[in-house]
Amino acid sequence: MSSIARVEGPSLTLRLIQPEDAAYVHSLRNNPAYNTHLSTVTGTVDDQRTWIEGYRSREAQGQEFYYVIERKDGTRCGLVRLYDIEAESFTWGSWILDENKPRKAALESAILIYEVGFDGLGCDHAVFEVRNDNSHTLAFHRRLGAREIASDELNVYFNYEQSQFAADQTHYLKKLSDN
């Protein structure tokens, strides 16, 4: 579980969310600058804390992992979640990077989440959806080689294979080290 509980990259760390993160989560999820392409949330910081406390049982059962993304100095700069975890696949989303993110945070946090799903959980592929109007994120996933498997009026649905990640991981890590 340690490789899942805390995942270290060159400039970012993913750590499992704690009830003390409720105000941070609530502020991001309710900020129009960050929540445009996410499902709507309601409630208070206390409601968010209660949700996190309830989530902890799903985490303990290996059903879901919700991470705070932090810079190496401990400054929080985002959130990301793995859910719908099955023997062969996982879904990831609820991905937010805020104004504190370092350069290349999108690439690094995606690499880290794939390391959790593919290496930590042993899954063969990831599935996820991106809102049709989220052009930056759609372009990001297409550049990484995710395959579009369907679309509807709201979302584009993707599949990303562990074999694709394994083939490209060295290239991605090199990109992170390039200035």
Image (cartoon, rainbow, N blue to C red):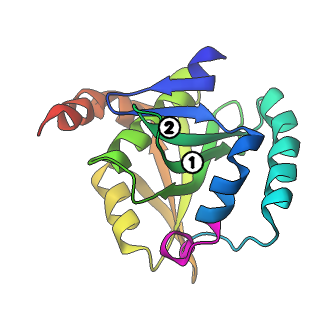
User: Can you say whether 94 is above or below 13 in the image?
Assistant: below
The amino acid type found where label 2 is placed reads Ile
User: Can you say whether 81 is above or below 139 in the image?
Assistant: above
Q: Which residue lies furthest to the left in this view?
A: 179
Camera-nearest label, 1 or 2: 1
The amino acid type found where label 1 is placed reads Val
* Residue at image coords 57%, 48%: 80
Q: In this view, does 61 lie to the left or right of 87?
A: right
74, 119: nearer the viewer: 74
Looking at the rendering, the stretch of residues picked out in magenta corresponds to 29-37
Residue 122 seen: no
Crowd rating for badge 2 (residues with CA inside 10 Å; few <14, some 14–19, many 20+): many
Query: What residue is shown with label 1?
Result: 80
Residue 99, image x, y percentages = 39, 60
User: Can you say whether 26 is above or below 71 in the image?
Assistant: below
Query: What residue is shown with label 2?
Result: 113
Residue 54, image x, y percentages = 88, 44
The label number, if any, that marks residue 105 in the structure image: none
At mark 1, the secondary structure is: strand
Query: Which image quarter is the N terminus in?
Result: top right
